[in-house]
Amino acid sequence: MNLIFAHRPLDATPSVIDDRLPLYQRLKDEFVRRIRAGTWGTDGPIPSEHQLAQSHGVAVGTVRKAIEALVADGMLVRRQGSGTYVRRADFGNALFRFFRYTDASGQTLRPRGEMLSVCATEAPATIATHLGIQEGAPVIRMHRRRWVDEEPIVFEEIHVDARRFAPLLELPLSDFGDLLYPLYERRCGLRVFRARETIRFGLADDAVAANLGCADGDPVAVIERTASAIDDDVLEWRRSFGLAHKFSYSIELR
Amino acid sequence: MNLIFAHRPLDATPSVIDDRLPLYQRLKDEFVRRIRAGTWGTDGPIPSEHQLAQSHGVAVGTVRKAIEALVADGMLVRRQGSGTYVRRADFGNALFRFFRYTDASGQTLRPRGEMLSVCATEAPATIATHLGIQEGAPVIRMHRRRWVDEEPIVFEEIHVDARRFAPLLELPLSDFGDLLYPLYERRCGLRVFRARETIRFGLADDAVAANLGCADGDPVAVIERTASAIDDDVLEWRRSFGLAHKFSYSIELR
DNA sequence: TAGTGGTCTAGACCACCGT
DNA sequence: CGGTGGTCTAGACCACTAG
């Protein structure tokens, strides 16, 4: 029996059929389709509210309402005077809204990423399930460590579908840098849009212990993350380990 | 140095001065004031959009926008055909959206609450800080256990300001039931509106071990919660302990 | 049936951005 | 400067709720 906290349900995929839904809902679904299909890309703004209203034969206010819903969902961003854009996650800064390292004085620190290994292998059952592929299908397994100052903070095991992320195999370890998601996008053309994390506590096995510099069996926090594209395709499954006594997680309810 | 995850910043308190803010913003701030002051209570609907527009000399659409923002903030709820109401948290069901127990088959279970002790005491420094009162001020300390089937799952230590929660001291332990927040509201007229939780990892002391039926020094998950009223007054500070190997926490990012 | 919120229209003027 | 989103107005009609 497990104690489980669940926060924020997944977005519903836009329904298959347009019923007698409100106009702005049908508009929103149509826009989602364009974003997922890539018809609206990230290189320039989407058509203006006025244009969309004209081309769909509706009032500007109705277009606004559809767009506002998509902005709330995180799919679009508006820039006054410039236009409305398909949102591209700004992992350079944004991911650290969720994932931060602070020192004793509360200063935010940026951890260094150190890629330890990148190798092609076959997916065991659990990995295959999480990635939504066949057991035994080719996957890439990465081991990675994150440092603050001279101290290893997190050890990570990361799996991706080898057929989609093949370019990573060509890359020297030293070229991976501190952030993976921009790399996925640059090298493989795959953009992480959302992630779901589960946190639990476990005990360090020998690999974890060796990489974190602790003893075998020491308590560790385990964060399992499933990262998905905008069309809900699972792109990556990773498991991060950190020393339990250094871990804390804050959340606001309601 | 700590690994800290932070999710959702606290709402900004409405600014002290109305600048040249948009009309709907100033309206929203005015509405927040009325909710916090209790001018708009939970017994009936707030004035209709039409009435509010007239009394403030603005268009209905502007009132709508202010109300929609407050609905998004969770302060109001709209009921078509009936009216708009100050939201009262429905802890009977709602809190379990965040806090759920599931068994092996994924079935959601409802834990039993067992109040172990309720006593008046003086606030130590740390409790006083969390509750925002003077060190040594009178507080009520409660010890509580939560059970699923015949198994103790969580042990809790709960502190509230004795001057505001005095009625709890009169109550027989068996009358506390499974949920505290409805009790706070019924007996003390204080409504919990939001909470902030921090999760970390620790070791069971003798009290925790005795109540969870584990060994002294066993690893436990520690959840510290600060619960506040709608006007951000801190009402309760609690610390919950659960066996680490039975704990997990899920969250969706973006 | 009267009154509420939900949807939608068709404008106006403003603040901001890029050229 | 023209075009964009941001604010605001003043209505219309609909779906729903409650007495």
Image (cartoon, coloured by chain):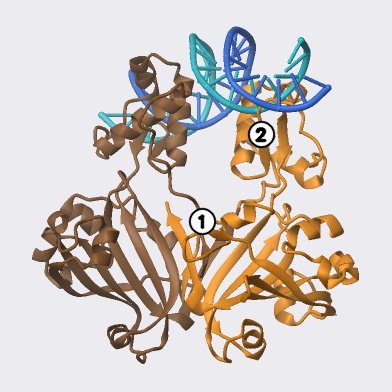
Chain colours: A orange, B brown, C blue, D cyan
Q: Examine the image and state in which quarter residue B253 appears.
A: bottom right
The residue lying toward the viewer, choosing from A112 and A25, is A112
Give the crowd class for mark 1: few <14, some 14-19, many >=20 residues within 10 Å.
some
The residue lying toward the viewer, choosing from B174 and B1, is B1
Chain letter of disc 1 in the image? B
Residue B65 makes an appearance in the image: yes
Extreme left residue here? B170
Give the crowd class for mark 2: few <14, some 14-19, many >=20 residues within 10 Å.
some
Relative to B52, is B147 above or below? below
Classify mark 2: helix, strand or loop. Answer: strand
Q: Is residue B211 shown left or right of residue B134? A: right
Q: Position of residue A253 (x, y in %)?
A: 42, 55
Labels 2 & 1 near each other (Cβ < 8 A) = no
Q: Which residue is mark 1?
A: B7
Q: Give the spatial CA distance, label 2 vs label 1.
A: 23 Å
The residue at the point 48 percent across, 83 percent down is B245
Q: Position of residue B135 (x, y in %)?
A: 19, 62
Rendered image: mark on residue A78: 2
Q: Examine the image and state in which quarter residue B242 appears.
A: bottom left
The residue lying toward the viewer, choosing from A38 and B220, is B220
The residue at the point 37 percent across, 27 percent down is B17
Q: Position of residue B238 (x, y in %)?
A: 30, 66
Relative to B218, is D10 above or below? above
Q: Is residue A108 shown left or right of residue A253? A: right
Relative to A146, is B60 above or below? above
The residue at the point 30 percent across, 73 percent down is B156
Type of amino acid at the residue the image marks with label 2: Arg
Classify mark 1: helix, strand or loop. Answer: loop
Q: Position of residue B250 (x, y in %)?
A: 53, 66
Type of amino acid at the residue the image marks with label 1: His
